[in-house]
Image: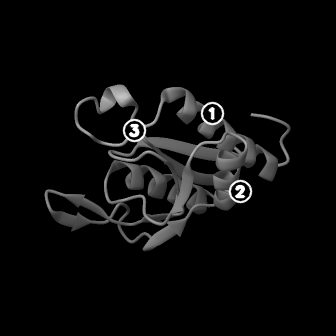
Amino acid sequence: KPLAVVSLGLHGSASVLHIERVAVNLKVVGGVDHPVVDDGPDAYFATLPTREMVAAIKTSAHVPAKLTYSAGTFLCNHIMYNALHYLSESGNGAQAGFIHLPPTPDMVLGTGKASMALPDIQRGVAAALEAVAQSLNVSTI
């Protein structure tokens, strides 16, 4: 029985960690809208301490981060929505949410797209996880 579920996924063109606040019951397949879960709620809010995660990433890890209000309509949103839906339906009580990570420089070489060095991403994620652990009164992750 987990206390928290923190999912990670790649953001295609960012130089900042995005802490996602909302997952919607929508996926777009071949240009057509479909629900992630038939008859599921329209959306779920992350139950992780999102504002505290952003603050920890910025102040403890010194890595750019921001709170965002849409996990998109593709795989990352699908994962976030399903995790929150499952936890809600099961009554587990675990916190859940999603962090969109920027690509590393080698992933976007020659494209001109934004990126972030892997050590910075790692420091940012570690700071976010520490904020989650603190919210759960757990000594460390």
How dense is the environment of label 1, judged by Cα within 10 Å: few (below 14), some, or many (20 and up)? Answer: some
Residue 115 placement (x, y as % from top left): 40, 38
Quadrant assignment for the C terminus: top right
> In the displayed structure, would residue 133 be above or below residue 71?
above
At 43% from the left and 69% from the top, the residue drawn is 40
Q: How many marks?
A: 3
Q: Amino acid at mark 2?
A: Glu
CA separation in Å, label 1 and label 2? 15 Å
Q: Is 72 positioned to the left or the right of 111 in the image?
A: right
> How far separated are the C-alphas under marks 2 and 3?
23 Å
Q: Earlier in the sequence, mark 2 or mark 3?
A: 2
Q: x%, y% of residue 17?
A: 51, 47
Q: Tell me the number on the disc at residue 123.
A: 1
User: Helix or strand or loop: what does disc 1 sit on?
Assistant: helix
Nearer mark to the viewer, of 2 and 3: 3
Residue 86: image location, x then y, percent: 53, 55
Q: Amino acid at mark 3?
A: Ser
Give the x, y percent position of residue 49.
69, 58
| Mark 3 lies on residue | 115
Q: Is residue 99 above or below residue 52?
A: above
- Is residue 57 at least partly visible in the picture? yes
Q: Pick whichever of labels 1 and 2 is earlier in the sequence.
A: 2
Q: Which mark is residue 52?
A: 2
Q: Is residue 106 above or below residue 82?
A: above
Q: Are marks 2 and 3 in contact (CB under 8 Å)?
A: no
Pick out the residue farthest to the left.
30
Disc 2 crowd rating (10 Å Cα; few below 14, some 14-19, many 20+) is: some
Q: Which mark is residue 48?
A: none
Sooner in the amino-acid sequence: mark 1 or mark 3: 3
Q: Tag 3, which secondary structure?
A: loop
**Pick the front one: 133 or 11:** 11
At x 43%, y 49%, the residue is 79
